[in-house]
Image (cartoon, grey):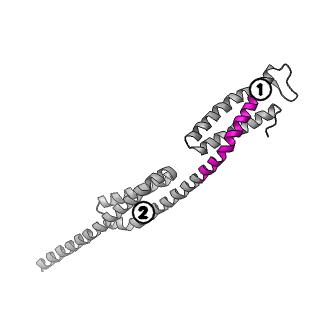
């Protein structure tokens, strides 16, 4: 009887080990698949969905930890959710990339006209400031303060415009347009303060 129970126990242990061994292969495969899927989307996600990437990396690391601890059942149970999270990450990164590319294309189209208009506005302000600086009498509606502000503004606009041009040269039209619009807005205000037409 004792021999029988020992044999039974040994058999049960063997079955349990076999069960674990049967799950080890699929668990290894699940972790490998998750790592490969994450590696395929990592660069895109790093650029367009970094916060979501961090959360998914933590989930994949948790799978690795479970595998290392021999918790094959836990790996197999968690794998579908991790796979789904990686898929969602890819979708989010792809959508954000498409948005960024659309914004870039729009900014690139807008850069052409503004890159002609803004330098003309700045040149016109410079010319007006030069004339008013030499004049003994300022025109009606133009004060010494507004003239001084225009002189200071010219320096700031030229610096920002230089940054915008550099950004455009490197292909970063989104930044270029942001800076160009800032210069245009400032130029419009200064032209008004000097009694100029901004049309």
Instruction: Decide if residue 87 is on the left or right side of residue 13.
Output: right
Instruction: Decide if residue 136 is on the left or right side of residue 12.
Output: right
Q: Nearer the viewer, residue 193 or 69?
A: 193
Q: Is residue 40 visible?
A: yes
* Labels 2, 1: front one: 1
- 175 is higher (above) or lower (below) than 54: above
Instruction: Identify the element where label 2 is drawn.
Output: helix
Give the residues in magenta.
Answer: 102-126
**Residue at the extreme right of the image, as rendered:** 140
- 196 is higher (above) or lower (below) than 45: above
| Residue 82 badge | 2
Q: Is residue 113 covered in magenta?
A: yes
- 99 is higher (above) or lower (below) than 182: below
> Residue 68, located in which quarter of the rendered image?
bottom left
| Residue 129 badge | 1
- 20 is higher (above) or lower (below) than 58: below
Q: Nearer the viewer, residue 118 or 116?
A: 116
Considering the image in quadrants, where does the C terminus appear?
top right
Local packing at callout 2 (Cα closer than 10 Å; few below 14, some 14-19, many 20+) is many
Percent position of residue 120, x then y? 72, 35
Instruction: Decide if residue 136 is on the left or right side of residue 20.
Output: right
User: Mostly what secondary structure, the magenta segment?
Assistant: helix
Percent position of residue 88, x then y? 49, 62
């Amino acid at each position: 009887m004792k021999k029988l129970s020992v044999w039974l126990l040994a058999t049960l242990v063997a079955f349990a080990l076999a069960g674990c061994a049967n799950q080890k292969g699929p668990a290894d495969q699940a972790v490998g698949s998750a790592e490969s899927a994450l590696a395929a989307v990592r660069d895109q996600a790093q650029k367009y969905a970094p916060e979501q990437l961090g959360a998914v990396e933590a989930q994949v690391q948790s799978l690795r930890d479970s595998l290392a601890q021999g918790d094959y059942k836990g790996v197999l149970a968690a794998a579908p959710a991790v796979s789904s999270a990686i898929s969602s990450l890819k979708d989010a990164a792809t959508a954000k990339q498409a948005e960024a590319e659309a914004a870039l294309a729009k900014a690139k189209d807008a850069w052409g006209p503004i890159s002609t208009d803004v330098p003309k506005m700045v040149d016109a302000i410079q010319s007006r400031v030069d004339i008013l600086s030499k004049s003994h009498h300022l025109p009606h509606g133009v004060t010494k303060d507004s003239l001084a502000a225009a002189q200071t503004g010219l320096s700031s606009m030229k610096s920002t415009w230089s940054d915008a041009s550099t950004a455009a040269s490197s292909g970063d039209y989104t930044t270029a347009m942001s800076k160009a619009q800032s210069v245009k807005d400032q130029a419009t205000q200064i032209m008004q303060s000097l009694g100029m037409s901004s049309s």
